[in-house]
Amino acid sequence: MFHLNDILIFLFFGIVAFVIPGTLTVWNIYNCFSAKPKKEKLISTVTVLVGGLLYLMLFAITYDTAGDWYEQVNTMQFHYVISSGYWGISWVALLGFAAYFVLLYINADRLPPLVSAAAISFIILLNILQITFAVQLSKNINNPLELSFYVYHFNILLLSARAIQRHMLQQVEIFKNRAAAQDNNIRFKKFYDIINSLSRYTFVIFVALFLVVAIIEIIFVLIGQGLDAPIKAFTDTADWTFSKQTPPPPSDYEGHYLCTVAAGGHKKVVKPLRFGSRRGATIIVNRQLCIANAFEEVIQIKFPSFHRMVRHIYDTYGYPLSKLITNPLRADVVYIIMKPLEWIFLLFLYLVDVRPEQRIRNQYVLQFKR
């Protein structure tokens, strides 16, 4: 049986996720194709602002994001969709929305050419970013509620196209009026003036677009984020479509602290080899981790009393130590500190085991479900 609270919550989510976005979407589609749009500015503004607020609210409810790819998060949490190291692209998106409202509320005849060109450029950049963001989410879209995110992305694309189309039509009308003011008896001159005006305006758009992109790249360089910052903002993440980084084990996973080192350190230092399996969880494995586990395996078989003592020491100090490995630099330091022990473990294996390298290779072999 459903309780009243359950019904109210269901209705609330239905209205927020489907009714409001659906109504605004239908209205926006009508305004885009109708010769006489109805309350276009109001509906467009509500779509961007209220729709954006609902988007953020649903996102916060659906995805509990708690850290960059190199930080440990709970198994029920996600890493950031966009790397916090490249926050600059959020300003580009905000400028894109501002540019949209400029074209929405100010007619073309009141805008200087360079402002018009810059506004169109930022709207284009906004849509590149928002489409990329939408694709980034796709890996973790698992139900109809989460599909509602794409309704907002679709509306932004639709409204952007409509704003640019309307602006271009206004510009054409402006040029027609200017052409009508010319001497009608001098047809060649009139034609020349129109072509000349259009060609200059097209050039301004091209230059403005180039300058906008160039300025953004210069800003990224000046704040130390590099020319590839817009790309890294999406690839320097974990859990998402464009993610290229492998996160450390979840914070609620009680694994070997060397697992944290293997996954969380800089690749050039800790030298991860492959994925592995430990207690049902997928982990990153490096040679140091395999050697340490092979050493434990051997002493467990050959020297059980000594193994119990070693295990007690590890259980007492190892797991708490793993909680302190919260960034790549700390993982690198632990890896380097562990190097002498790694060599001792390796020497021990070569002294007591018949096939030490095979034993090392067999550690944490990834188990595939059938």
Image (spheres, rainbow, N blue to C red):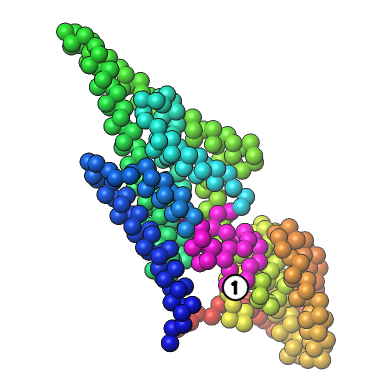
Q: Nearer the viewer, residue 288 or 32?
A: 32
Residue at disc 1, secondary structure = loop
Specify start and end residues of the magenta stretch as a single range.
Answer: 55-83
**Residue 203, how many percent across, how many down?**
38, 24
364 relative position to 212: left or right: right
257 relative position to 121: left or right: right
Q: Nearer the viewer, residue 236 or 45?
A: 45
Q: Nearer the viewer, residue 45 or 241?
A: 45
Residue 292, compared with residue 29, is above or below; it is below
Would you say residue 71 sits in the magenta stretch?
Answer: yes
Q: Quadrant of residue 142?
A: bottom left
**Residue 329, how many percent across, how many down?**
73, 57
- The residue identified by callout 1 is 75
Residue 63, compared with residue 130, is above or below; it is below
**Quarter of the N terminus within the rendering:** bottom left
Overall secondary structure of the magenta section: loop
Residue 144, compared with residue 299, is above or below; it is above
Q: Quadrant of residue 162?
A: top left
Q: Is residue 149 visible?
A: yes
Q: Which residue is painted at 35% across and 54% down in the image?
A: 24
Q: Is residue 121 visible?
A: no
